[in-house]
Amino acid sequence: MIFEWLVIAIAVFTSIPLVVVGSECLIALFFKTQSPCHSELLKQTVSYKILIPAHNETDIIGKTLAKLIAELPDSNPGTIILVADNCTDNTASIARSLGVTVLERQDTTHRGKGFALDFGIQYLRTNSHPDVLIIMDADCETTKAALTTLINLVTISKLPAQMTYLMRVIENASIKQKISGFAWLLKNKIRLSAMNKMGLPVTLTGTGMAFPWQILEIVKVGHGNIVEDMQLGIDCAMQGFPPIFCPDAVVYSDFPEQPTAELSQRTRWEHGHLQTILQQLPVLVKASYQRKDWRLLALALDIGVPPLSLLVMIALSSLIILSIYSLLTEGSTAFFILLLSFSYFAAMLASVWWRYGQDYLSAKELSGIPLYVISKLSIYIAFIFKRQKEWVRTDRDA
């Protein structure tokens, strides 16, 4: 009897992230809220800066900065602060030629985006800091309306805000990139939209995130977490500044063209995500209980969802094991709990695909999802035996 209850408990535990994702999809699809869109700068004077960390980005930085300068609300390239972090190429000189403020940093011991951001923040702290600081990556594109909407939202709310960060998928992209693009849409638009509609903290996704300056005086940015954005969002929520979502503002990036670069990027993201779950989930749950703050518990449940491929692997493997167990013992409760949870999860994902995902994947291409999930098995095995703990730059093509 005790063993039966233990099996049921395992099934319930496995079902939680499935129900979380399914419910976020349901809320995003069917619950409406009015989101104010301020496409013109507020009448009061609001100063802003855009901080871009860059490491050996000669191939793309000129194109990225030229497009961004053309979209600046104030048309002033000096608004952009680029941190050339441990660069050994022409990144700094290219940025300077475009009128951008360039800071050069050399520190091979403290490497990574978090340290580069902190270097830029320390500079601004002693050189007339802005009211709003926007953080962008060196390979991203956005629009003037999106930047203006983001600045206004942060000014009004006095909270950190995250733009909708999506990956572009070119027409002749591989099936892996198309599935990844859809997964990115689910994670960075659908799930963030649901959390925002419920008035809950959202995760930060690394680029297109903005902060009132006062928060940056309190929250630590310089650390070695390889998914520094997720950690930064948690730290803001823990300090009483829950990040909010800015769905009307979109920032785009592209997947690396080289398969090895794409694998490296994905490994960093997913190992960092799993490591953050292990480290921060207990902290958030404990803080939620001690402060009686259910919003922190909701954030813990959201962050506790593993990468979707791993979640599917775990759920399907558990279903197979529980089906065998139910046949041998006639104890089918655990199996049906997990089956119902997985069915709900799958139905909600199908609904999201029907509404938003057909631009990424055709109905025929959906059949490639099982192979895509299996192809990522090596990443999760590496997390156990050869975990990536340090930041590694993603190679990009021009």
Image (spheres, rainbow, N blue to C red):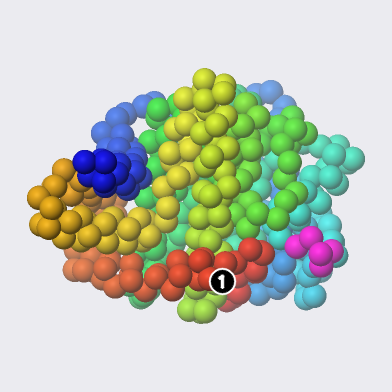
**In the shown orientation, is residue 385 left or right of residue 57?**
left
User: In the figure, 23 relative to 347: above or below?
Assistant: above
Main secondary-structure element of the magenta-colored stretch: loop
Left or right, residue 256 beside residue 318: right
Residue 125, given in percent of the width and then of the height, sits at 85, 39
* Image coords of residue 114 (percent x, y): 71, 53
Near-viewer residue (31 or 147): 31
110 in the magenta segment? yes
Q: Please tell me in which quadrant of the rendered image residue 29 appears.
A: top left
Quadrant of the rendered image containing residue 175: bottom left
Residue type at mark 1: give it: Lys
Q: Disc count in the image?
A: 1
The image quadrant where one finds the C terminus is: bottom right
Q: Secondary structure at mark 1?
A: loop
Label 1, on which residue? Answer: 386
Is residue 376 visible in this depiction of the protein?
Answer: yes
Q: Residue at x 71, y 60 (%)?
A: 112
User: What residue is rendered at 84% in x and 45% in y?
Assistant: 122
The single residue placed furthest to the front in the displayed view is: 1
Can you name the residue that lies furthest to the top here?
Answer: 292
Quadrant assignment for the N terminus: top left
Q: Is residue 271 positioned above or below 229 on the image?
A: below
For residue 170, say whether it is visible: no
The stretch of residues the image draws in magenta is 107-111
- Front residue of 48/201: it is 201
Q: Observer-nearest residue: 168 or 384?
A: 384
**Image: 48 above or below 288:** below
How many other residues sit within 10 Å of disc 1, few (<14), some (14-19) or many (≥20)? few
Residue at 26% of width from left, 46% of height from top?
A: 3
- Is residue 31 toward the left or the right of residue 217 in the image? left
